[in-house]
Amino acid sequence: MENSVLIRTHDLDKIYSLGLTDLKALDRITLSVARGEFVGFVGPSGSGKTTLLNIIGSLDVPTSGSAEVLGRRIESLSHKESAGLRNRHIGFIFQTFNLLPVYTVYENVEFPLLLQGMESSRRKQLVGDALEWVGLADRADSRPAQLSGGQSQRVAIARAIVKQPEIVLADEPTANLDAANSHHIMKTMAQLNEDLKTTFIFATHDEKVIGYLKRKITLVDGKIAKDETVEKTTAG
Amino acid sequence: MISFLFKGLLRDRTRSLFPLLTVLSGVVLTVFLHAWLNGSISSLIQSTAHFSTGHVRVMTRAYAKESGQIPNDLALLGIDTLMAELKAEYPDLLWTPRIKFGGLLDIPDAKGETRAQTPVSGLGVDLLAPESPEWRVLNIRQAIVKGRVPSHHAEVLIGEDLAEKLRVQPGDTATLISSTMYGSMSVANFVIAGTVRFGIVAMDKSTVIADLSDVQQALDMQRGAGEIFGFFADDLYHEERGDAVTLDFNRRHAFSPKDTLAGDASFSPVMGTLRTESGLADYLDYVGVFSGVIIGVFVAAMSIVLWNAGLTGSLRRYGEIGIRLAVGEDKTHIYVSLLAESLMIGFIGSVLGTLVGLAVAYYGQVKGFDIGSVLKESTMMIPSLIRARITPTTFVIGFLPGLLATFLGTAISGIGIYRRQTSQLFKELES
């Protein structure tokens, strides 16, 4: 079990300086996430979910304590090293999709592979697979503006998983979707978790997402209030 | 990866077309303004040289002190010798004597009574010799509006505006009333051979041009001339060469303090250059500094505009940069790609802007721009047709704001990628 741990934090603090006062966004967070988990940080706004997700994704560094992702200490990574970690091992899914509007669906999904310098034929195969997984192979030449919200988020999922990362981080992935699309997206991600054994970590307060989680870590005022394993999914 | 970024650049007009148009516009304006100022200054210098001072000119020391008054009583005498010396010693310049004079031009009616009369400023030049440099310097044949060039003694040309004012035609008689170099009254009859338009308002509305020998006779200045002008063969003013010729001539004709005390120095010849004559040195320095300041201010202003365009372009793309960072692109790679884009836009915009600017400037150089309407009452030797002038600098000056400012704008705004926390970019992405 110990070998399959991908993420480990220990006494992790994150403090933002707000002029004369400091805001403690994370307070002594200690947790571990194993390979293949489908876990979510849940809690109200301001509880520290996104901050924790950003640190795990090497987009931010802790003020004190440690965060280890895939054996790398986040606080000691250079810009280049953290970019490399994100490019090869971590996929991101955003609340607002954040596709590059001037590129086609295919090109958006292809982008992370281009950064890896992957050869063309391999890229083509992986992008095709990713679009098949999310059910958008027929929209490869469309531009993001031509897609619905649900389709856009599925493209974002394809972009996150195309490089077959160990970890996918999703920050409020259903916040801009209606209920039907939310369930569709969550089912897609749950299926990918099953098929590819990719670890998914969510930051959410959406009950529709929470219903799919296999592990739920509740944050309140930057502290872990509860860490529970959910025996079976109820949504769907 | 390069083709991927290039594809995005081409598809996103806010990243390519609009910045390109901004750079292009700025460069066009810079290039044209430079050529225009160049042309204006050159036109002014050329007109001043052709009509007022030559590239160098020789006068008596006494005449030189009051040359603005046209003191023909202090004119050079025995100019044949002096002309021969000038031609022998400085053969790379074209030498031509002139007499400037003032007077009244009286137009008689059929009975010989005064029909019209007006003050005129006159110019006595070598009009009758076919090899006279004045044909080229004054561009007389092209300046003829009505009639013909004088071919006999006692024929004159008068400014077209002056002719209209006096209601005279070629073939009419005109009487010049002036004073001789010894101060007595002078009256001489001339036939108007033709009318001329030099495009200089002050000349066109008040000038009478007569052959030098006729003026010498009318003003009792046999073998005399107020001034001897020297022109460089290419009709361009070469300051260093002009200074060298002047220095050499004045050294040859220097007087000792003893001679000066004896009073002989006043009528000895002295040479001056276009720069030093009539306070033109200060004016040229002023114009040079002023045009430099204008170009500098304009280039700086355009640089700020283009810098700002680069800045806003980069700031507007923080969202895109956030995505690229999140996907795993290195900050340095993003920064370098932004700089490469700005260089490409700046270079293409500068090249196109320079080409368009040069095309407009070339039109202005060939056709010119008529500013005669604002010079109606002018007495300055400013040509009413101002032409732009393209110089080697015109080809490169647009690159300063076009390339450098765009690049610097992006470079400075792009530093924000490093200074901001990645998560901050990420938050902006979400906002």
Image: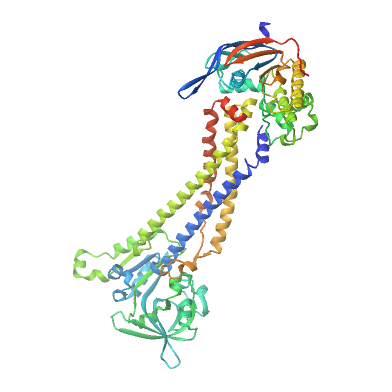
Tell me, what colour scheme is on the image?
A: rainbow
Query: Which residue is farthest bottom?
Result: B111
Instruction: Examine the rendered structure and indicate whether residue A164 appears above or below residue A106.
Output: above
Residue A83 vs residue A227, the one in the foreground: A227
Residue A97 occupies quadrant: top right
Residue B346 vs residue A12, the one in the foreground: A12
Q: Position of residue B14 (x, y in %)?
A: 63, 41
Query: Is the N terminus of chain A in the top left, top right, bottom left or bottom right quadrant?
Result: top right
Residue B251 occupies quadrant: bottom left
Looking at the image, residue B216 sits to the left or right of residue A86; the answer is left
Q: Residue at x 65, y 17 (%)?
A: A42
Residue B414 vs residue B270, the one in the foreground: B414
Residue B360 occupies quadrant: bottom right
Instruction: Examine the rendered structure and indicate whether residue B229 appears above or below residue A185.
Output: below
Looking at the image, residue B171 sits to the left or right of residue A46; the answer is left
Query: Is the C terminus of chain A in the top left, top right, bottom left or bottom right quadrant?
Result: top right
Q: Position of residue A80 (x, y in %)?
A: 58, 23
Instruction: Examine the rendered structure and indicate whether residue A30 appears above or below residue A184.
Output: above
Q: Position of residue B221 (x, y in %)?
A: 33, 79
Q: Is residue B270 visible in this depiction of the protein?
A: yes
Looking at the image, residue B134 sits to the left or right of residue A33; the answer is left
Looking at the image, residue B362 sits to the left or right of residue B154; the answer is right
Instruction: Examine the rendered structure and indicate whether residue B300 appears above or below residue B323.
Output: below
Q: Residue at x 50, y 55 (%)?
A: B33
Q: Is residue B151 visible in this depiction of the protein?
A: no
Q: Residue at x 62, y 10 (%)?
A: A31
